Image: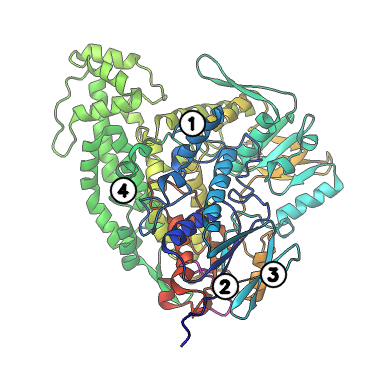
Amino acid sequence: MPEHSEQPHAIHLAIVGGGPTCTYVLERLAALVREQGTESPLDIVVYDLSGEFGSGQVHSPGQTRTSYLNRIVGQVAFAADESVVDAGPLLAADERPTLLEWCRARYEATGDRTFDVVAEDWPKRYVHGLALQDQFARYRDILAGIDEVTVTLRTAEVVDIEERGDRLAVRTADGAAPFEADYVLMLTGHSANRPELNPHQVAWARFTERHPVRLVPNAYPLEKSLPPEQTGPGTTVGCLGMGLTGIDVILYLTEGRGGVFERDGDGRMSYRRCGAEPDAIVPFSRTGLFTFARPYNDKERDIAALEYRGPFLTVQAVRELRRTVGRPNLISGVEQRQLDFEAHVLPLVLLEMSLIYYSTLFGADFRELAIRGARPAYEKFLADADSFPDWQSARDLLTAPVEGLAQRVAAEVDRVLAGGGAQGPGGSGEPPVDSAVRSFLTVVYGADRAGELLATAGDPARFAAAVAAATSPWRHARRAAEHRFSWERTINPLPRSAYRTAAEYQEAFLDFLDVDIRWAAQGNLRNPAKAAADAAWRDLRGVVIEAVDFGGLRAGSHRTFLGVYTPHHNRLCQGASREAMEKVTALIKAGIVDISVGPDARVDGDEERGRFRISGSLGTERLVDVLVDARVHSFDAERDMMAVYPNLLRRGLVRKWANPGLGEPDFVPGGLDLTRDFHPVRADGAVERRITVLGPPSEGVMYHQIGALRPNKDHHVIRDILCWIHDFILRGSSPSPQFTTSGGMSYE
């Protein structure tokens, strides 16, 4: 017998999209292959249309310096760390710096104050891009140094993928010879939908053909979509969308043109014009509200200990509700007991928010008693949630014990603060009054001032006078009875009517912004409202994901969840930094940003005056020369701007996911039908194991599948990447079996 063995065939890997997630992919490959080796050589080709490998276009280092990353420095990583379960081998610590460590090293090397940051700072997005590209290059070099690995970077748009026997031919727009891959990983990130398929955009585009106005169907990249000659002095720019993209647009058209934000001696921010701005910017949306300011993250100092774990909104509760009130439905061959978000999940979210709000206000003793008091109603709800006529009734039953206790405690606290005597122990079933008073004063005035006030408590009259004279830096009400949790007020902090003039509405709007920014500064552990939103909608997001994913909600409820409650989630806990919102405030005061159209805004073309007209429920209207669509488009494989997804649909390699209605219309959100390990289901129902799809195309069958990697956090992004890597690291070069049925355990 010959002494040599047959050389294994190379595994050919195509990665479509070279942005942040691709950086994380190369990190895992670098660590795994360098440590463990590979039975077969790896031939890796990475495609990115922008050529911005590591950052992608969204995080490009070449973008405007005015756009913020929507996460603090201390919450960004580029590699797996010890917190990731079953991550496999880790790179050496100096090979996997966090963004904070990367910035500190860059500052020490260059002295550039841009990189002189602390964990709580909000970095500019281009800084994140610089770090991503640096780390991408590091991981690529590690892989390139391994004999069995080659990495090729292609600046090209992938437009189609076709089957060629056991492999997939990856076609690019430049007409180059297709790369034949054993496995394809789709990391295309956020895209946009073709405007010609949107009836509103079609009507607006036709209006621009008749009049000298301009439509910008997609805001990014800002530098290309908003040229100074078309959005400068003498123009008014309408901005459809008041979320993070809308704020990016506003800051680019002002600070990005050379305007300057300045602080006075009291820290108040103002704006100094440069003369290159448009005459006015008119942001508008259905709610008429910007995203709320993201609170200071006190939890970063000890994530494991301080991230919230709820007693009521739990995965176990969702599973029990499925058992008791879930309605069976067959989805992609798998039975799912579906829930209704409003009827079954929202009441638990609001119970948790109420508990967090009042526990933050009145302390740990209150929390313990409130949990105990709410437990009977909670158990009744889990057993028979369908017995309530509507979600408000369920909410009222669940929160009544917490609300009742809060009102009794508030009355006692107010009695003591008014000079009603020493703080003694609480009555039966009531928390100690002294601890509630101390907690309340700390929330309202801060720990130092609370200590000063409590030092006078031995003299009730003097204590009452001192409390009455104290001022809350966060503009909290002095009386405990005025602190009430309200879901309706949380999502609609400004009344939608009752304003006599646009100026009166603007005054109320600015007052809300001031309070919201102050509350954000107080942080997500000390401010009751911010703590409730951050804990219930951010820390417990995994519970909501458990309720939603893979047809967990009934079709109509799923539609409502994505259309109504996802925007609430984004506004409550995915907001902009305090500094960004201070800048928006300064621009409103400077008369550049005009928010006077108010809520329920709509846009149409004014044929007589030849400009777009924006009008809202307040009776105000504004005419604009440029209309920018600053909304993030939901992914739709049929409507996507990139040719690759419509072509994959046409070839039957993928299909759109549908939530079948039971006595109601199906819901087809637009994303792909994927298994739990992110393989697409083909048109014929088989699972296409040679393709893996991560990110926005999975939205619909799954929820909230985007996000930057975090340090010291067992992040789903790394686990998702490992699903793909294990396909070929464990199975070798032959993707066997290529297809499996989409039913049964393939989804588990």
Which of marks 2 and 4 precedes in the sequence? Answer: 2
Q: CA distance from mark 4 to mark 2?
A: 42 Å
User: Which SS does the magenta portion mostly show?
Assistant: loop
The amino acid marked with disc number 3 is Pro
Which of marks 4 and 1 precedes in the sequence? Answer: 1
At horizontal 32% and vertical 16% (from top left) the residue drawn is 468
Whether the residues at callouts 4 and 2 have beta carbons within 8 Å, the answer is no
Which of marks 1 and 3 precedes in the sequence? Answer: 1
Label 2: which secondary element: loop
Res 418 seen here:
no
Q: Nearer the viewer, mark 3 or mark 4?
A: 3
In the picture, the disc for residue 178 is 3
Which of marks 1 and 2 precedes in the sequence? Answer: 1
The amino acid marked with disc number 1 is Val
Q: CA distance from mark 2 to mark 1?
A: 43 Å
Q: Nearer the viewer, mark 1 or mark 4?
A: 1
Q: Nearer the viewer, mark 4 or mark 2?
A: 2
Q: Please name the residue that numbered disc 1 is placed on.
A: 117
The amino acid marked with disc number 4 is Arg
Q: Is residue 379 above or below residue 456?
A: below
Q: Which residues are magenta?
A: 671-685
Q: How is the image coloured?
A: rainbow
Whether the residues at callouts 1 and 4 have beta carbons within 8 Å, the answer is no
In this view of the protein, which residue sits in the foreground, 216 or 168?
168
Whether the residues at callouts 2 and 1 have beta carbons within 8 Å, the answer is no
Label 1: which secondary element: loop
Q: CA distance from mark 3 to mark 4?
A: 50 Å
Residue 526 horizontal side relative to residue 668, left or right: left
Q: Please name the residue that numbered disc 2 is placed on.
A: 182
Toward which corner of the image does residue 455 lie, by quadrant?
Answer: top left
